Image (tube, grey):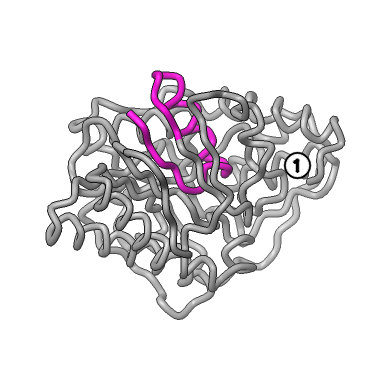
Amino acid sequence: MRVLITGAAGFLGSHLADRFLRDGHAVVGLDNFVTGSPDNIAHLMGNTAFEFLHHNISNFTYVAGALDGVLHFASPASPIDYLEHPIPTLKVGALGTHNALGIAKAKQARFFLASTSEVYGDPLVHPQPESYWGNVNPIGPRGVYDEAKRFAEALTMAYHRFHGLDTRIVRIFNTYGPRMRPRDGRVVSNFIVQALTGAPITIYGDGTQTRSFCYVDDEVEGIYQLFQRGDAMPVNIGNPVEFTVRGLADLVVELTGSASAIVHKPLPEDDPKVRQPDITRARQVLGWEPRVPVREGLARTIAHFRATLGAGARA
């Protein structure tokens, strides 16, 4: 196959490019480096099966040649990013999704949307199955991301129903691992960087809010299998093992051997109190579930950050 991956220089996009290339497929990567990094795809430059387009998918986009798949992963994806870039976040969810769908339609390619657990908002149902419609504040600060992804899902289903386009939708839950930006504002990278640098570990709220953390290798494998064998309805891909934020902080301190103190700050507006995927559909449709325990995944991620920070990389 030959596939287009938007957001290919991002955390997940770059790992997904690796996964397609490993199976012998050709990849066209597209990114404008708003939150992605050239470092994430530097190892692919010179690979004849990989092409790169420095471009913003929210603008008119032309890709030469045949495509078998269009995987739309372009978007700021952490609160610090989409609060800094609210309008580009809305644009890439709306205009970017429309452009990517148009490419897939023109090329008669399968379309794959990277959606998010944030479509569930601050959920009133726990754990969250794909049938849950969510509890989202459309005018809150997080609404720029939540509603962009909800609109992207609606647009994807409209193309599927009206144009007969072959589509997939993944709802991605908290993912972590190598190639995360050290200061991207996500809880795993925040805690690890703070622990390794001796800074106070910052918990927002009392730390009893829960999250579920999926190691990047597991997440990408679930995404890859969904692209190959899934159906048009959304599928949660994430780790159903639930942690409190305080429990995660304690585990990071243990694994790093850090002497960092834990401090508490006010909880941000609309921050979800719980987040845990119901992965029944992923098990039934794909035969997929995560394999890397959080303790092992964190150890791998800590080793990555030790090397990154030790090499003097910009945090």
Residue 86, compared with residue 279, is above or below; it is below
Q: Position of residue 217 (x, y in %)?
A: 48, 27
228 left or right, relative to 71: left
Q: Is residue 185 magenta?
A: no
What residue is shown at x 41% (from left), y 75% (from top)?
137
What residue is shown at x 54% (from left), y 68% (from top)?
88
Closest to the observer, 196 or 234: 234
Q: Secondary structure at mark 1?
A: helix
Q: Residues within 10 Å of mark 1 (few under 14, many from 20)?
A: many
What residue is shown at x 48% (from left), y 45% (from top)?
174
What residue is shown at x 54% (from left), y 36% (from top)?
14
Closest to the observer, 258 or 18: 18
251 left or right, relative to 256: left
In the rendered structure, which amino acid carries the disc numbered 1?
Val
Classify residue 136 by image quadrant. bottom left
Q: Position of residue 151 (x, y in %)?
A: 33, 67
Q: Position of residue 188 (x, y in %)?
A: 62, 43
In this picture, which residue range is highlighted in magenta? Answer: 1-27
Q: Is residue 3 magenta?
A: yes
Q: Which residue is mark 1?
A: 193
